[in-house]
Amino acid sequence: MRRRGGRNAEPSACVIDAQSVKASTSVPAASQGIDAGKKIVGRRRSIITDTLGLLLAVLVTAAGVQDSVAGAHLLEQVATDHPSIRKVWVDGGYRKHFVEHAATLGIDLEITQCTPGTRGFTPIPKRWAVERTYGWLMLHRCLVRDYETLPARSEAMIHRAMTDLMARRLTGENTTSWRDPAKTRQPQIPG
């Protein structure tokens, strides 16, 4: 996928972000938490993507786990799996000790934030890739809410959705849409 996009096979930069989602009633209370900022009871999905938005690593935790804690685990995993990573962009939710942790791994970490006084939605440079990936993942109904009993299964569902997305990109197949009038047109019955 990266070569097709005109990039090197191994990424040199990545983006980290976290998303809180509500949990189904089948999710054990022990693996859930409360995201006080968003007032969501459920789980938190932390992902690392390359600059094209392709998934490099995922970690599903209770929603109460801080971004910096989950990010440190993910960054260690990515540093091991992709030693070419030298730059990472994050949002303001990541703390100072996370910046220091990235430096010990030899990775330059940059915190990107929106311009003060900006109203409404404004894409933040460099971070739009991970936000777009979350948008792609939300097209899969099974990821709108966390239904899985084990966090590892939730991670597997995210990998499955990303595999589907990459296969569609490689084959040039579009995602079918209910809005496509050619696909929703009913055959005419003569009468």
Image: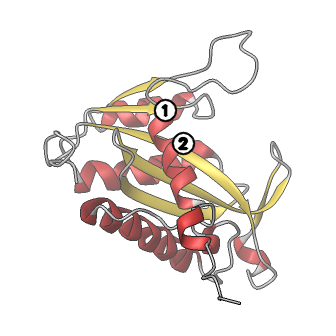
- Contact, mark 1 vs mark 2 (Cβ under 8 Å): yes
User: Helix, strand or loop at disc 1?
Assistant: loop
**Figure check: 176 above or below 120:** below
Residue carrying label 1:
127
Q: Quadrant of the N terminus?
A: bottom left
Q: Residue at x 65, y 47 (%)?
A: 66
Horizontal arrangement in the rendering, residue 92 relative to residue 78 (left or right)? right
Q: Quadrant of residue 85?
A: top left
Measuring from the top left, give residue 87's x and y in whole percent: 31, 30
Q: Nearer the viewer, residue 110 or 160?
A: 160
Name the residue at 56% across, 31% down: 91
Position of residue 90 in the picture relative to residue 53 (left or right):
right
Image spot of residue 173 (x, y percent) = 35, 65
Q: Residues within 10 Å of mark 1 (few under 14, many from 20)?
A: many
| Left-right relation of 83 to 169 | left
Residue 180 place in picture, x, y as percent:
57, 62
Q: Is residue 142 above or below residue 135?
A: below
